[in-house]
Amino acid sequence: MEERTAPDTEALLSVEEAAAALGRSARTLWILARDHNLPRYRIPAKGKTTLLRWGDVVEAYNRPREVPKKAAA
């Protein structure tokens, strides 16, 4: 079994890299970014690559997600 090492908390990772480090899919990271309003970064030389700060990803992943209440019918 391959052992993963966590990136530095200040490291900027692409969505795919962060997903691999977390052991989840890229889609899960996009949902996490949307639901927890993760700050996203773009570096002009990198084109449209979206970067996430690893510390923000871990914090959002470990934070319980609030489930919206259903409206009374």
Image: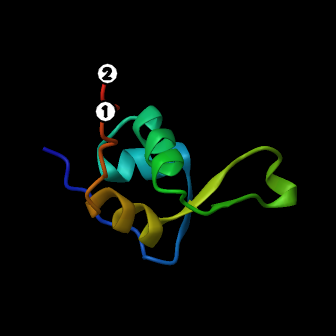
Amino acid tagged 1: Lys
Name the side, left or right, on which 72 lies relative to 27: left
Name the side, left or right, on which 29 lies relative to 22: right
Q: Quadrant of residue 4?
A: bottom left
How far apart are labels 2 and 1 at the CA level? 9 Å
- Quadrant of the image containing the C terminus: top left
Graded by Cα atoms within 10 Å as few (under 14), some (14 to 19) or many (20 or more), the crowding at tag 2 reads few
Name the side, left or right, on which 45 lies relative to 26: right
Residue furthest to the front in view is: 73
The residue depicted at 32 percent of the width and 66 percent of the height is: 6
* Residue identifier under label 1: 70
Q: Please tell me whether mark 2 sits on a helix, a strand or a loop.
A: loop
Q: Where does the image place residue 27, in percent across and percent down from the top left? A: 46, 33
Question: Does 18 appear above or below 29?
Answer: below
Whether label 2 touches label 1, CB < 8 Å = no
- Quadrant of the image containing the N terminus: top left
The residue depicted at 19 percent of the width and 55 percent of the height is: 3
The residue depicted at 31 percent of the width and 51 percent of the height is: 66
Q: How many marks?
A: 2
Foreground of the two, 64 or 32: 64
The residue depicted at 40 percent of the width and 68 percent of the height is: 7
Q: Where does the image place residue 61, in percent across and percent down from the top left? A: 32, 57
* Residue identifier under label 2: 73
Graded by Cα atoms within 10 Å as few (under 14), some (14 to 19) or many (20 or more), the crowding at tag 1 reads few
Q: Please tell me whether mark 1 sits on a helix, a strand or a loop.
A: loop
